Image (cartoon, rainbow, N blue to C red):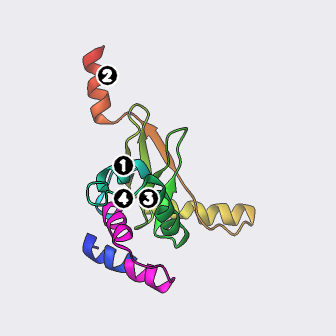
Amino acid sequence: MSDESQLKEAISTLKETGVRITPQRHAILEFLIESMAHPTADDIYKALEGKFPNMSVATVYNNLRVFREVGLVKELTYGDASSRFDFVTTEHYHVICDSCGKIVDFHYPGLDEVEHLASHVTGFKVNSHRMEIYGTCPECSKINKETH
């Protein structure tokens, strides 16, 4: 699905739940959809402050909370670092760099079977699962080789 159609779909979801579409909300959503970097609220604020000089970091947080509540955005909390935000598309997993904190998406449909197995073995009604893989990204690996 293109960024444009994802944005249209997200806006109609917001309208259906009675959320007003302000220019700031539109810009934050657009930024999240286009960003593959899983930005923090601060990253979003810095990217948009030129366009919206009177917008605060609190405004960004409040809007992200609204988006999270209607299911458009996932808040990713890994370790002590600031929360990062991910526009909800298809089910995917994250590989996280131990050095710089970069998060990269990867898709692996086979893991859906884990939910069925967990449900079968435990009797739980499983709603979701989350998997994180940790390592060192290519950029940090290169820097580590150069410095050692």
Identified at 44% across, 33% down, the residue is 98
x and y, in percent, of residue 117 in the image = 63, 62
Q: CA distance from mark 2 to mark 3?
A: 35 Å
Q: Earlier in the sequence, mark 3 or mark 1?
A: 1
Tag 4–tag 1 contact (CB < 8 Å): no
Q: CA distance from mark 4 to mark 1?
A: 16 Å
| Residue 127 seen by the camera | yes
- Residue at which label 3 appears: 60
Q: Nearer the viewer, residue 5 or 20?
A: 20
Residue type at the position of mark 3: Val
Between label 2 and label 3, give the one nearer the viewer: 3
x and y, in percent, of residue 118 in the image = 65, 60
Residue type at the position of mark 2: Asn
24 with respect to 19 (left or right): left
Q: Nearer the viewer, residue 17 or 125?
A: 17
Residue type at the position of mark 1: Asp
Tag 2–tag 4 contact (CB < 8 Å): no
Judged from the image, the secondary structure of the residue bearing numbered disc 3 is helix
- Residue at which label 4 appears: 54
Look at the picture and state if 105 lies above or below 12. Answer: above
Res. 43 mark: 1
